[in-house]
Image (cartoon, grey):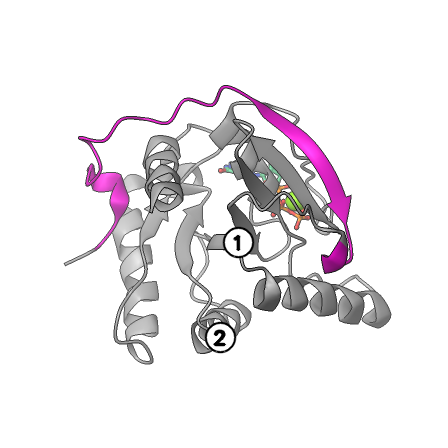
Amino acid sequence: MLKINNTGLFCNRELMKVRSAVFEKSVTKVKDCPSTGFPEVAFIGRSNVGKSSLINLLFERKKLAKTSATPGKTQTINYFLINRNWCAVDLPGYGWAKVSRDKKLAWSGFVREYLLSRENLMCLFVLLDIRLEPQPIDLQFLNWTVEQKIPIALVFTKSDKLPKNKIIGAVEKYESELKKHWEFLPEIFITSAEDKTGRNDLLIYIDSILKD
Ligand code: GTP
Ligand code: MG
């Protein structure tokens, strides 16, 4: 059975209120990440998949995270302090062809280090464009996160761009690909920054992680 959370799995749980959401800082070195010790969740995925848009959707702030139609907009680790007690982290996208080799290496360096060393990272949301077939770069990245025991959840983005009757099929395709290598599937969310699909489920899930 599909384990998608937009089915109302969490319908009995109360929705977290976003009382405050403020940009805290941008860093390119893990040692510069905030030392407050607040729990954090991070968002990663291919350039242009919709990471920054999803953050704006979650916190209902149109310009909190900078979005762009041109891939490669987010190039730093961006911290947002939410409700003064936890952080959302917007990470640079991977797989942007136009960036120079040097820059690519630097990014993969600090993002990798962040993912491997950040002890207060409670969940890494890996974003996938629901319109695309499973892509090698995403599968490679996902397999790496599991090898490294990084806690992940999958978030399909841009569901408004796919006819409703194609959504489940697109997710199932991904699931069968992942099941080739994985015994267990992570939580899966379907979202749209356009029509707000998935916002409540994601917030409820984050709330449950933070309370664990
Ligand atoms: P980088 O920072 O460059 O890695 O990109 P990103 O993953 O942060 O993507 P961003 O949020 O900047 O969005 C990229 C483009 O996709 C923008 O033009 C957004 O308006 C668009 N977009 C993002 N999410 C959605 C969505 O759910 N639906 C639709 N239709 N467009 C979206
Ligand atoms: Mg971005």
In the image, residue 175 sits, relative to residue 11, either above or below, namely below
Quadrant for the N terminus, please. bottom left
Identity of the amino acid at label 1?
Asn
Residue holding disc 1: 120
In the image, residue 113 sits, relative to residue 80, either above or below, namely below
Q: Quadrant of ligand 1?
A: top right
- Using a 10 Å C-alpha cutoff, classify the residue at mark 1 as few (fewer than 14 neighbours), some (14 to 19) or many (20 or more): few
Residue 68 is situated, as x and y percent measured from the top left of the image, at 70, 39
Choose between 22 and 189: the one closer to the eye.
Answer: 22
Q: Which disc is residue 148 wearing? A: 2
Q: Visible in this render: residue 41?
A: yes
Residue 26 is situated, as x and y percent measured from the top left of the image, at 75, 44
Magenta span of residues? 3-31
Q: Quadrant of residue 196?
A: top left
Question: Could you tell me which secondary element the residue under label 2 belongs to?
Answer: loop
Disc number lying in front (1 or 2): 1
